[in-house]
Image (tube, grey):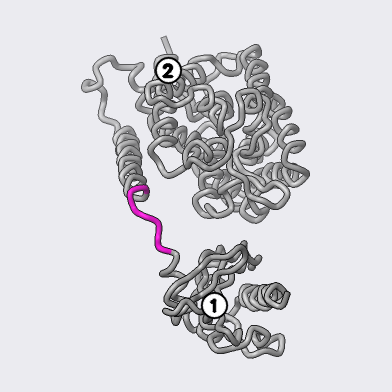
């Protein structure tokens, strides 16, 4: 008897790869429409950009980099782009999506040989790269210009907000990534795929039930854990990917249990609120090993295969990373938050005590007399929001300035935190805080005029508001 061995996906079906891809795409459309209605038109822009950039990078890589047959119409890159967009919040920037698409298509898919050869789920690689490189833009969902906490964030960090009820979680009346919020529409899409026999029950059932059981054991609300975050999207549409999941039923069951174990562990003990994508990626490493168990009952009798040992190495590395992550998380929560007075002292050094008011902080001397003020500024820089504080004395001359947080370009705009730039403000009246390009006395950071101007403009505007308040 002869056996033909070929690359995944291995599907006993008359369906072509193209039909399967577009069937999954069709099943995901209702959830995407809900995301657009929930979060606004920009959600549609994110989805369109993600899909278009993935198709573009696949064409470029197949035509010019790897010089293989052009297969952009098989639907794989379109589906990857859609799934990646569904994993992102509306706070993501367009140019960041292109970076994620490059990693997803060129590095995670085409560099391995294209459809059927990739080790990792490309959409999740793209998502992971964006979230790791740009964490400040991934912290929440922008609604009317305000970043709001997701249900997982509320549960994990004990945010002072009421957690959504089961109905809202199920329908999608919550904050989250674009395509993950409506569990109802995602489940309907999954039912459609079940009926067409495109996916099987093994991975989703084991994945979800594992999270349910662990939640109950650790006294978490199982229903909230299942309906929050990207668990439903990941269990039905990503963990079941033909190429990066096991072939046989036994392997699929173990794979699903592993995904559930990692997802719950990282949610409860890790530093991230959401962990579905990372859990699936880690379990992708185990697929060759899980498939191998189906050929030999005696693991030790298996023919030595260096590739399997490489996979085992990375799997162990992932486990060690998680263990380190748990330890770091514990240390973070044990440590006490810094004393505000230490930061205030940096910008108003002559003050002995501080009293926080509604819109400013008073600096007092040893006799409890006001000798200055501290003001907070929030402004938009080149790459994102800049938060800072500055102090002024009774003559409204600046005594110091400190950047609290910024997302400017490393090595360029981020240099607004350097003393050479900030020390220029000391001793100046706020109306003198104008960069030289605009006729003032402040040297802008080289190649970062926008970031520098954002600081100077914010200082003048804040002081103007404060003076109107003082003169009442």
Q: Is residue 203 magenta?
A: no
Nearer-the-camera pick, 247 or 358: 358
Q: Measured along the vertical axis of the image, is residue 188 above or below residue 360?
A: above
Residue linked to disc 2: 253
Image spot of residue 279 (x, y percent) = 44, 34
Quarter location, residue 261: top left
Say whether residue 159 is left or right of residue 145: left
Say whether residue 278 is left or right of residue 286: right
- Label ID, residue 391: 1
Q: What stretch is highlighted in magenta?
A: 333-339
Quarter location, residue 428: bottom right
Identified at 70% across, 46% down, the residue is 143
Gap between marks 2 and 1, in whole Å? 60 Å
Identified at 73% across, 32% down, the residue is 34
Q: Measured along the vertical axis of the image, is residue 439 above or below residue 376?
A: below
* Helix, strand or loop for disc 2: helix
Nearer-the-camera pick, 106 or 233: 233
């Amino acid at each position: 008897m002869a056996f033909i061995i070929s690359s995944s996906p291995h599907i006993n079906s008359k369906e072509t790869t193209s039909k399967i891809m577009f069937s999954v795409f069709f099943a995901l459309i209702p959830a995407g429409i809900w995301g657009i209605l929930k979060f606004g038109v920009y959600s549609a822009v994110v989805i369109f950009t993600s899909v278009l950039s993935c198709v573009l990078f696949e064409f470029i890589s197949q035509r010019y980099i790897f010089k293989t047959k052009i297969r952009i119409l098989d639907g794989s890159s379109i589906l990857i782009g859609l799934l990646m967009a569904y994993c992102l919040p509306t706070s993501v920037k367009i140019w960041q999506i292109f970076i994620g698409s490059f990693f997803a298509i060129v590095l995670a898919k085409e560099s391995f040989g294209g459809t059927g050869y990739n080790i990792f789920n490309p959409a999740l690689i793209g998502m992971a790269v964006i979230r790791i490189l740009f964490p400040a833009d991934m912290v929440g969902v922008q609604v009317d210009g305000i970043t709001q906490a997701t249900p997982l964030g509320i549960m994990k960090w004990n945010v002072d907000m009421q957690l959504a009820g089961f109905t809202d979680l199920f329908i999608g009346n919550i904050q989250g990534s674009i395509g993950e919020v409506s569990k109802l529409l995602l489940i309907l899409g999954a039912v459609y795929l079940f009926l067409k026999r495109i996916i099987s029950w093994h991975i989703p059932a084991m994945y979800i039930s594992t999270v349910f059981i662990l939640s109950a054991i650790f006294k978490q609300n199982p229903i909230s854990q299942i309906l929050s975050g990207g668990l439903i999207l990941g269990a039905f549409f990503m963990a079941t990917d033909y190429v990066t999941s096991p072939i046989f039923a036994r392997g699929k069951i173990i794979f699903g249990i592993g995904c559930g174990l990692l997802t719950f562990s990282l949610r409860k003990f890790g530093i991230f609120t959401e962990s579905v994508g990372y859990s699936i990626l880690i379990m992708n490493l185990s697929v060759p090993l899980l498939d191998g168990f189906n050929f030999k009952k005696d693991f030790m009798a298996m023919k030595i295969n260096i590739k399997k040992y490489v996979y085992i190495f990375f799997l162990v590395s992932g486990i060690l990373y998680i263990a380190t992550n748990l330890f770091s998380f514990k240390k973070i929560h044990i440590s006490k938050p810094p004393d505000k007075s230490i930061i205030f002292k940096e910008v108003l050094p002559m003050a002995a005590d501080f009293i926080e008011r509604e819109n400013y902080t008073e600096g007092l001397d040893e006799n409890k007399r006001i000798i200055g003020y501290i003001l907070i500024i929030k402004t938009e820089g080149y790459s994102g929001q800049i938060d800072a504080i500055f102090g002024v004395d009774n003559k409204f001359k600046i005594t110091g300035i400190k950047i609290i947080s910024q997302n400017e370009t490393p090595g360029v705009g981020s240099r607004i935190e350097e003393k050479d730039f900030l020390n220029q403000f000391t001793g100046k009246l706020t109306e003198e805080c104008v960069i030289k390009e605009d006729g003032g006395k402040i040297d802008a950071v080289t190649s970062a005029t926008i970031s520098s101007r954002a600081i100077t403009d914010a200082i003048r505007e804040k002081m103007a508001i404060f003076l109107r308040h003082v003169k009442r």
